[in-house]
Image (spheres, rainbow, N blue to C red):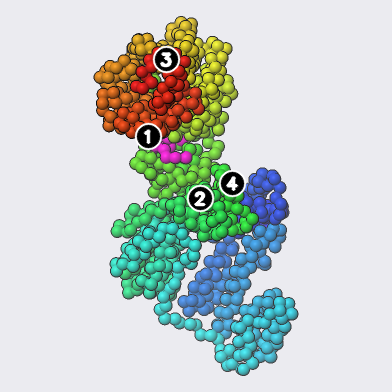
Amino acid sequence: MQIRTPVTEITVAAARERILLALLLLREGQLVPVQQVIAALWDTSPPLTARAQVHSCVSRLRRLLRRAGLPEDLVVTEPAGYRIKVGPEDLDAALFAARVERGRAAAADGDLAGGRDELRAALSLWRGRPLTDVDSDVVRVAAAHLDEQWTAAMAFCLDLELRLDLAEEILAEVADLVERFPHHEQFRGHLMTALVRTGRRADALAVFRRGRALLAEELGIEPGAELVELHRRILNGDAALLLPQAPRTLGRRAARCLPRDITDFAGRAELVQRLVGALRDERPEVVAIDGMAGTGKTTLAVRVAHAAAERYPDGQLYLDLRGHSDRAPLDPGEAIGALLRQLGVPAERVPPGLDDRAVLWRTELADRQVLVLLDNALGTAQVLPLLPGTAHTGVVITSRRRLGGLDGAQTVSLDVLPLDDAVELLRRTVGERAYADPACTIEVAELCGRLPLAVRLAGARLQHRPSWSVSDLAVRLRTANRRLPELAVDGRTVAAAFTLSYQQLAVPLRRLFAVLGLHPSGDFEPAAAAALAGLPVHEAEALLEDLVDVHLVEAPAAGRYRLHDLLRDYAAQLAQDDAEALLRLLDHYLYSVVGATRFTELSDARSLLRLDAPPPTAPEFATQPEARRWLERELPNVLSVARLAAEAGRHRHTCMLTRAVSPLLFGFGFGEAQLDLYERAIEAAVALPDAELEGESRNYLAAVYFRTGRLTDALAALQTVIRIGERENLPRLIGTALTNLAMLYSRLGQYPEAIASAEAAADIAIDEVPPSLEFKRNSTIGLVHTQAGNYAQALAANRRGLAVALRIGGIRPVAIMFGELGLVHLHLGHLTVATALLRRALVLKRDSVNQYGAAETLSKLGTAYRLQGRITDAITCQRAARDQMERVADVSGQCLAANDLALTLRAAGRGDEADWLNKEAYAKASRIGDRYEQARALAGLNRMDEAVALFTSLGARDLTALTR
């Protein structure tokens, strides 16, 4: 193998470089997956270091190309493999195919001599058998089609030359071909015909006898029917054999150019029916189908075209406009020329200019009923000149770009398949194995993002691996960085389809698309994209809209964007080393959530969150409702980005993001899903090391345990926080942990211990007590005294807590104190005051995104309504509170809401329902150790002696609270 340039000629001596270069050239600029490169370099048993060795081989090939005077970037690295940047004009194989095609077209138009000249010019490009010095079975198989193309072209050329009466001229060549290809019956027939026409009838018969004997001896078969018929005509002295065949002239024949309609098409039944109806209409519409790569646009268009074909008896045309291809897009003039050839218009009738061609195209269609399928359009400008001028021609267009400029067209934006259709496609592709494991079949369809191309390739992988089960493939697809490489079969890959779209983008769009792969899954706002790309928000939004138009980004709602999972995987591979973009994203979410939560916390509680000036993409929140809407919308992204920071080893961002979002999580309700968030934050704080951040993270971890009923784990976590505070002399941290410990003891019904912990927090020696600690201390003392039935002390502590909250500011602390004061007044029988306070607390808690607190207050508001005789209102409140407690996953809160609702239902005469709720509350409270709610549940079940004994053992003084 040699590389020849105008300045030098270099032999590719190394075997692996020869194999790699041959494989890339055979693909003619298309992507070659890494696995296929490995298979070519090592036909069997590749080493464990195969990928690394492939990288080294690519580097050596690039150096070789540089020595030959060629650019190093001629070999391009893509996320899923490699490709070589060559065009049709750079490859003799492509030039050969083009000239053969021109020769066949000329012959079809009756120009036999012109066709023969083109074919001879094509055959002259050959310098022997291709790639004989490349030792690779994969390459040999891939190159086999070149031999077949040469053989077919030579056979067709000889056929034309016999029709042109050139038998004597080709006789020696065709005799040599029969020697080289003794089993090729077409060559043998050409030789027999040439011999007859040059007067050597006996020699022609002898050639047949030798061929027949050879086939019988070596292959055990008889010659084919055409050769036997030729032999019979020679024996009979058929005079027609002595005459050259005149050029054939054909009448107008309906063109049937549609690609094959696949048999395992699945889904989209209603859409197919609608589009077929549009094409069968008396005045058919132009149907334009757009969608992201791999959504099955061409497959759908072909199915629709076949279904509507009977409406168009004069022909069905098909043309790939190459809008997203490894070859240059067809310009409209070329496209019209190709379509005219399909209609049978001779080449000499086709004018050179676009306008004249368009006139001829519309003229030819004027009296025909023809369906035209224009596949893979680049855009509206490419398509407009191809549209017919009459109303009885049907047109179907597919494109990856929205074709907004086609007035009057019926446009369809194709999405991924519904899950049921994706599963059905996989079943049709795979067969019995998919039916045998329905759960894994559904998972594979989801892991493919329900993208038809991905689902089909996944099915093909299983077809080619009969020993695999569907679960085997699911395991391989579960890892994001393996999904795209796994979705590749025989050079056809999802990544390659994406690459064709990506390569069409302008540089700013490429840059933005790549960095979007760093954003976690889910939708995002333009500001996040702007942070990733380092752009102003308005510029990023404009670019996002451009990416939406080419279906590389989705817009599920106004101002919200997202990437399909597989496109995100692809983009992530493009941007995997962009540490600066990742840092900008982390800063964007950190500063944004800090700004949004400032309305809900006492300011001094945020001492750890004092940051520098925010980045330009971080929003400024003027009002609390505006901040609340942002937090509710962006919470999934904030949590995902915190995890992303941990995975990237950004320890301080991990801790700070987790701390910043914690008050919001506390309001939404912690769940088991947040445990790993705090465990990662603790690991990051230890790695920094930062004892205060570690203590804060462990404190919030204790809150997760507290909410989910793991009270023993919560106790251990708080004791660890206190030890850290004592070791590092962090009195504020110790005070916070002690107040939380008091709340925990209160939940366990250990009121003396709870009061002692709260008082210990008050006794901590701090030069200036932070207001946040002062607030927590008073609110906790108030809570404990309320449960213990010490209402005077509770009222005093809660009033002190409210004074602190009002003095320092913060909606959530004020809301908490209104709720606690309302509860005390409820116990004291001050129903009017209690109702007013609880209503006010409910509004503020909802405004401050405190869903747990809102549920608790709503349940107690229902109690106030019950005591006022408003049973219906009470039931409505308490059912809503119970549902909300289930959502926030607070087990003790679920017990409280169930016991409150049971009291109201019993007052309404619905004792059976009430008993069921009390039993549920008793079981949950017993499991987590909440003795206060255990006692209330026992009272509801009329086990009053047990309830009173348990309540008294807690130190609770107000026995009427059992049934209030």
Whole-number angstrom distance, CA of label 1 to CA of label 2: 42 Å
Q: Which is in the foreground here, disc 4 or disc 1?
A: 1
Dot 4 or dot 3, earlier in sequence: 4
Name which of mark 2 and mark 3 comes first in the sequence. 2
For the record, the magenta segment spans: 521-532
Q: Earlier in the sequence, mark 3 or mark 1?
A: 1
Label 4 and label 3: CA atoms lie apart by: 56 Å
Whether residue 726 is visible:
yes
- Return the x and y of residue 227 as percentages of the image width and height: 62, 83
Q: Which mark is residue 475?
A: 4
Query: Residue sitting at 50 percent across and 11 percent down?
Result: 731
Characterize the local packing of mark 4: few (<14), some (14-19) or many (20 or more) Cα atoms within 10 angstroms. Answer: few
**Picture quarter with the C terminus:** top left
The residue carrying mark 1 is 912
Residue drawn at x 54%, y 49% is 440
Under circle 2, the secondary element is helix
Amino acid carrying label 3: it is Ala
